[in-house]
Image (spheres, coloured by chain):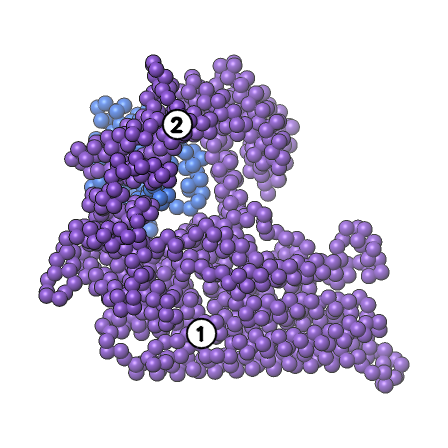
Amino acid sequence: MAELVMKLYEAAVKKVPNSEEYHSHLFMAYARVGEYKKMQQAGMALYKIVPKNPYYFWSVMSLVMQAISAQDEKLSKTMFLPLAERMVEKMVKEDKIEAEAEVQLYFMILERLGKYTEALEVVRGKLGEKLTSEVQSRENKCMSLYRKLDQWPECNALSRKLLLKNPDDWQFYLSYFDSVFHLIDEAWSPPEQGEHCTEGHVDSAVDQAIKFVEDRIAGEDSKDSRHLRGPYLARLELIKRLRQRSSSEERELGNPLDLMFEYFVKFGDKPCCITDLRIFVDLLEPDQYVQFINRLTETVPLSTQAEDALAQPADIKSLQRHLCVVQLSRLLGMHHSLDTEHKLHLIEELKARYLYGLKFGKSCLKTELQFSDMYCLLAAHVLVDFWKETGEERHLWQCLGLLEEGLSNSPSNAQFKLLLIIIYCRLGAFEPIVDLYSSLDAKHIQHDTIGYLVTRYAEPLGQFAAASQSCNFSLRFFHSNQKDTSEYIIQAYKYGAFEKIPEFIAFRNRLNNSLHFAQVRVERMLLDLFLEANILSSLEENVRSMGLCPEEDDIPWKEMQDNRDLTVLVSWDPKSRQLSEEDRWLSLEEEILWLRIRSLTLRLIATLATPSHPVEPKNSEKAAENGVASKNDTLHELLRQLEVALEGGKRFVERKVQYHFLGPPSTRLTSAFASGSCQCQASAFRLVVDVHDLDISGLDDTTEVQERLGNSFKDLIVQLKDIRNKCESDLFEIRDGQNKTKPAALENLVFFTETVCIILWVSSYCSCILRPLKSNLQKKKKKKKDANTPTPAIFTNYQEYISALQLLISEVLDHIKGLETNLTALKLDSLSLEDHTLSEAEKKFKKMVREKVQSSYQRSLQEMAELLKKRLDTVKGLKI
Amino acid sequence: YGIPFYLQYLAHWPEYFIVAEAPGGELMGYIMGKAEGSVAREEWHGHVTALSVAPEFRRLGLAAKLMELLEEISERKGGFFVDLFVRVSNQVAVNMYKQLGYSVYRTVIEYYSASNNEPDEDAYGKKALSRDLDKKSIIPLPHPVRPEDIE
């Protein structure tokens, strides 16, 4: 479409060469498809017809875009950018610069060329006066240049000036401190006379920095109105930096414990207090933790109503203060170091505080959070700790009940929903996630950033319909992104928002190269092949409609972007238990390994669809000459890659990587290897090579191949049985009144089901090859009337294999039926169980979560049974 | 809002897009807006399209700071006033805007109703900038209007 528009306007300008309108449409048509070179020319052509500045600068910007998109950085720096620079300089010399956008563009070019001094001259000079739209546009640009040019006196003086104006602008504290320490290291001293530098007064010693910060604080302290957080946090930041330099002068600012205490007294009733302080808790020594928390606690006004009742806050502010203390103690590891008894006590206390605090939020709207919600979440976190330490599942169940209760009181609390999602999935129950996730109302970009929470679990837990749907949601978002961005790139040209153009393109690329995008693409196609496709007839059609080409790898492995928001679940865990950079890298490595295996699986299935011999087999040399890779080559190459990927996967599994509970979910890699499904699927694909050989060479000279095939069939059944054996156990039991789940058995059932689907595609291919061979043989026999020629064993082997497959699937179907019966029986059983220690609400939610999990298991079993029944029918049609 | 909506604002009024970040890197809030209207009719003005502060960073004066910046940008562009829509039922926001010097210029009936099927009134608030010396732009309209009557 876009190409047609381009052609249309190319023809139009040929016909009416002086039309401003057609030329500008042509420019936009090129912009839509990113034809930067043509845009550059079209812009100039326009300018020649109508000498308006914007047209000239469209052309310049298109040069910049050529520089940005060029593979060869040298070419950018030596050709495109200098040319763009000269074009702008020409206008500058002729005094023709009119708009702010033009200066912005000039700045962009100089910056990209690394000509920072020149850029600084522009910003500070006459042209810079045009930079007025953005708040502090000139200042921000100068600041970034001073830093790049190591002009620390100017950087310092400017930061200082800006902080005097707004003592709450955090970024300038950072540049102020950076510059002070650079100046100290350089032993810079101010000139004896006159201004310190072009930006004014410079602070170049620690005592000056201390005084500067303390003056800002004094300013705040003397105010009657609301205090700003910046100056107080800046003091802590300065201590942090002095400590990094092992400077004893930090003492002059005070003791961090006292200062953090002071901060808490000032801002403890604000929910952000914990966020602000958490970046500075490292300033405390471990042996100060208890003292620190005790001191904070003492300031929180709590009062007891009855003799041995828990002291509670009288208002929301006190509640918030107390909450902050609890969050800080968790952050300092004080929850983790408790023994069992104290932990239990803590959980009860947090629950009590949560319930008590609900009274402050009686008038809250449904869209607002309850003031005491965080107590509930903290109790949930401690329960998860408990489960981690003891392995006792009941803590997770209790946690689920508590969070469901919390959610019923505070239906908009996203953190409750997210944690519920993680825990339900840990227990193998995906069904509750559908409603939870949809009530999160994830929008647009969030499909990319948190979509993984859903797509990671739906399919592996046997909820195929939900899996397809969640992939579709994500895919719809990614596909519209491509369309959306080009339109706004054009608008950015129109309005001269040149700085935004590379940003829009980077944004588009970031989404196109998204790990999640690649994953949902592959999984969506695999799901289609597992669920929808008619294995007996429609592989070619499916592969074609998916646009799947086995030779082509459309996943941008090298540019892969991990856009997952891995800290979407809030946590006050101590640093050692928080998501680390290493976790991020490991998780990405793991995701990529698994994606590689899945994408190769997909492409290998696709090879089964491509015609066996596009040219006559004898002319295969010719075919190679013509550049047509034969099916055999593709197959071998993909198999080789699969071996490498599996080897990589295996090595990763051996490392036994574990992430924190709230960290990234691990992939299916480990369980796939444990189930044996990876290995089994690979064996199935390996077998295709021999079948292909048989297809090319016929029955006569392939005794060895046939023998090998016979063994491979047998081996495949053995491997499948192994997977089956790993799903034998019950999924759900109630033992001593406690729920016990075996999510691994469910996952293995899914692996079994997926593997059966893949094996059937392979078997279908086998039947396509063997069937004509068999009928030819029979025809020959009839002709020769020679009934004594023995029929090669391969046919019997194949038939036996199909029968064994049939039997195996029936057995698993029976097993699933048994599991379903057990679940139903348990449902009735559990009705009679009552725990008298629980409150009414606890009973209610305990029952609710158990029912949800049981119902989810039932659905998973049903979906798998349905699919396996379908596949059982398929097997019947595969006999020859 | 969908991504196209944000991209449109970024392409047209990038200067009107401001985010506030906490020292730890958390996003505290953002404001987005635009400049529009005829200069000749003295209707050239800044408009607040969205203002949002994360729950844990509320009650810190952040919204006021972001509004101040948006007003500053509108001043520089020579706007006569800044305007915005706010749901009447959103009392917290209505009070905040009043404190910041905004007055109800007119109410629009059922402006937001499409989204929640509940009839609601929408206040159309305005604040005059320094260019409008006589504060002509903010003389309130006597009667409520329907959404189709707004240009």
> What whole-number distance in Å separates the C-alpha atoms at marks 2 and 1?
62 Å
Q: Residue at x 37, y 79 (%)?
A: A734
Please tell me which residue lies in front, B19 or B15.
B19
Q: Position of residue A473 (x, y in %)?
A: 47, 56
A48 vs B101: above or below: above
Element on which disc 2 rests:
helix
Please tell me which residue lies in front, A236 or A430.
A236
- Res. B75 in view: yes
- Labels 2 and 1 positioned on one and the same chain: yes
- Res. A602 in view: no
| Amino acid type of the residue tagged 2 in the rendering | Leu
- Residue indicated by mark 1: A742
- Residue indicated by mark 2: A183
Chain given the colour purple = A
Q: Is tag 2's residue or tag 1's residue first in the polypeptide sequence?
A: 2
Q: Residues within 10 Å of mark 2 (few under 14, many from 20)?
A: many
A773 vs A494: above or below: below
| Residue A593 marker | none
Q: Quadrant of residue A751?
A: bottom right
| Amino acid type of the residue tagged 1 in the rendering | Lys
Q: Name the quarter where the N terminus of chain A is drawn.
A: top right
Q: How many marks?
A: 2
Q: Quadrant of residue B40?
A: top left
Please tell me which residue lies in front, A848 or B123.
A848
Q: Position of residue A838 (x, y in %)?
A: 24, 74
User: What chain is tagged by disc 2?
Assistant: A
Question: What color does chain B have in the rendering?
Answer: blue
Q: Residue at x 53, y 61 (%)?
A: A655
Which callout, 2 or 1, points to the residue nearer the camera? 2
Please tell me which residue lies in front, A350 or A544.
A350
Q: Name the quarter where the C terminus of chain A is drawn.
A: bottom right
Q: Residues within 10 Å of mark 1 (few under 14, many from 20)?
A: some
